[in-house]
Image (tube, helix red, strand yellow):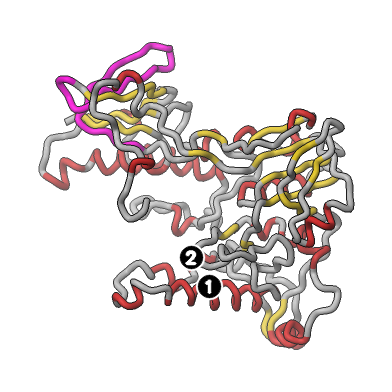
Amino acid sequence: MRVAIIGGGPSGIVQLKVLTEAHRRFSIPHLELRLFESHNRLGGIFSHHSYEDAELVSSKYLTAFSDFRPRRDDPDFFSSDRYLEYLDKYATHFELWPYINLNTWVKSIRRGDSSEHVVIYRTASGEEVEWECDAIAICSGVHAIPNVPNLPGIEHVPVFMHSADFKSRKQFGKGKTVMVIGSGETGADICHLAVTGDTDRVILCHRDGWLGAPKRVPGQKFLPWLFGSEPYDYPQLPLDVSQVTLFDSMYVHPIVRDSMIVWNFYHFVGISAGGWLCGDSIYGIDQFVGQIYSERFHASRVFFNKAWQRISNHVSAPWRPTKWPLTSRIRRFFFNTDIPSVSRIIEVAPNPSHISEDGVAHFPLNGRPESERINETVVKPDVVIFATGYLPAFPYLNTPENTGRKPYPVAFGADVRQI
């Protein structure tokens, strides 16, 4: 039996490893396997869409595979370079390299005549090859096409790019105004690089707010007036291994399973109460701007931005209350950690509506305080970076080569459970 694996990221590598052991687990003949990766190394998006100082937001305890643990001296969070090294060593440890074809681009797949499928791929030398197989594992991920929203007048900005093309601080230049569109984890990382670089001004634009969350358990000091409120001099536990919710997908009573009880608990205890106890804001840890106010603000609907703490101080500094309310003063009596001052801030704005011919960005007045404040200034960006994610695409499915044959199923045609 022949099996093709498309994609050499983490999922593709694990799929390959499992299939190499299938003959031992199921008493079947050895499978003939080929993994196709279009780039020159394993790692998928971590290889070709990474950037300076990139760091994973899930800890090594959850990220590493159970059958190949990381080194003891690895930090809690892999850098992208270390993660790529880990994946290479995984392939070496399980002797996967003989099955891996790098620099090999899958042009299309089609239904076969004498076999189930035919993979049409192009080698590093440009040769086009057809390979018949019985099954295909699609592991190419969903980060395929950079999602660049339409921004009228973007051509009036000297430099603009998608985050897929961003690699290092050098691309900002010196003394420039940098505007980052997109308030996810990549946007936060790029803002961090900008505000700690040689830029003059940094603006973070968002569509409808974000939820700032920590990667580590916030290190609050108990009774700071007695024991001091200086930050801990050692790292706190990663958040993703400190929660009992790690096991919440195991068996639960049907009443709990079919209701919002657990989600409401996460929301009110984990987000609102937790955010307030750790940073005086129910909308995110130390988050006083860019909050999510709509019905989207619920644990069941939001995406946690765990790169937030890289920039939270630079963003929140000008938005923290000048006089704390009584409830906050009571909290600080019991729990508090000093927040160091910052020399630079990151301004916040709604996504721009357009850029005029003189290169000035214009922002809508949407009722948020940050929209009013940014409209009191003139923003003329020298660099615009779209940190707006990716669109899923599987260009090798249902190509002209498969015309007249049974089409391959795609997500857009799914009708199960409202997908």
x, y percent for residue 5: 32, 33
Give the mark, 1 or 2, whose residue is nearer the N terminus: 1
x, y percent for residue 139: 37, 38
Q: Is residue 417 left or right of residue 71?
A: left
**Disc 1, disc 2: CB below 8 Å?**
yes
Residue, far right: 377
Classify mark 2: residues with Cα within 10 Å, few (<14), some (14-19) or many (20+).
Answer: few
Indicate whether 132 appears above or below 151.
above
Near-viewer residue (219 or 115) = 115
Indicate whether 198 appears above or below 319.
above
x, y percent for residue 137: 30, 37
Q: Secondary structure at mark 1?
A: helix
Q: Which quadrant of the structure image shows residue 313?
A: bottom right
Q: Which quadrant of the structure image shows residue 326?
A: bottom right
Residue at 62 percent of width and 47 percent of height: 186
Q: Main secondary structure of the magenta part?
A: strand
The magenta-colored residue range is: 113-138
- Looking at numbered disc 1 in the image, what kind of residue is underneath it? His
Q: Which residue is mark 1?
A: 267
Kindly tell me whether residue 43 is visible in this rendering. no
Q: Which residue is mark 2?
A: 300
x, y percent for residue 165: 63, 32
Residue at 78 percent of width and 37 percent of height: 355
Q: Which quadrant of the structure image shows residue 281?
A: bottom right
- Looking at numbered disc 2 in the image, what kind of residue is underneath it? Ser
